[in-house]
Image (spheres, helix red, strand yellow):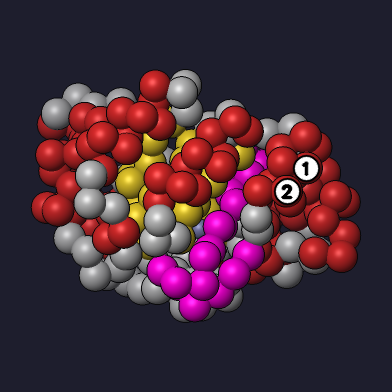
Amino acid sequence: MYVAPSLLSADFLNLKDEIVKVCEAGADLLHIDVMDGHFVPNLTFGPCVLKDISKISSVPLDIHLMVENVPFFVDLFLPLKPKFISFHIEAEKHPIRLCEYIRKHGVGAGIVLNPHTPISSIIHLLEFSDLVLLMSVNPGFGGQSFLNLVYDKIKELRKLVDSKNLKLFIEVDGGVNGLNASDLDEAGADILVAGSYIFSSNDYKNSINSLKLEF
Ligand code: DX5
Ligand code: ZN
């Protein structure tokens, strides 16, 4: 299991220390939530902050766009060469074109589904994407409760990915913690995003290891 700590729950007054600590504690990716105040009712990191974050992170960035004007934000962040840029399928009219565009720049293309959006809506997109991020909370804020409905969606997607022999990661985001990690693993998740669970703990290594199911 790969673990992507979500910086949204970090101590912003000590951002550099937090990034260094979480990278040293075994993070595989650094999950960055970009919000525009329109697609979700919150605002977070912009391009200046992300540029500096990318300079000090020793693990690749995993950028989760919660925005309406997706191509505009994709262009802002492609130069940072993150591992993935993921956008919400609910926000983009031409997702195949955008996935191809992201990939053309050597970055992994990710599709995000809100909790209510069915897997069937992205069947024709799977071959164009490198990652599917399943939201297990309504996006916009950290520290919300996990929605159990995501288990069936992970299983359905896992089956599809395996049957089509696709090389695609399944990532889960929202309310992930040490109690649901093994069920998420069993359902077929490859990457777990966790914000409050990791950053509110006093031992980042321990909490990351518990999500990796290594004790
Ligand atoms: C929510 C964000 C998440 C958030 C997760 O919209 O996409 O990445 O930071 O936070 P926790 O793990 O606290 O639910
Ligand atoms: Zn996220």
Q: Secondary structure at mark 1?
A: helix
Residue 181 horizontal/vertical position (percent): 47, 57
Q: Nearer the viewer, residue 24 or 63?
A: 63
Image-based side of 32 in relation to 199, left or right: left
Viewer-proximal residue, 195 or 83? 83
Q: Which residues are magenta?
A: 21-44
Rounded to the nearest angstrom, the CA distance separating label 1 from label 2 is 7 Å
Q: Residues within 10 Å of mark 2 (few under 14, many from 20)?
A: few
On residue 9, which mark appears?
none
**Is 83 on the left-hand or right-hand side of 204?**
left
Choose top left, top right, bottom left or bottom right for residue 67.
bottom left
Within the magenta stretch, is there residue 52? no
Q: Nearer the viewer, residue 71 or 200?
A: 71
Asked if residue 202 lies left or right of residue 39, the reply is right
Amino acid at dot 1: Asp
Q: Which residue is mark 2?
A: 48
**Depth check: 13 or 212 in front?**
13
Residue beneath disc 1: 52
Residue 120 in picture, x, y percent from top left: 12, 52
Q: Residue at x 87, y 65 (%)?
A: 13
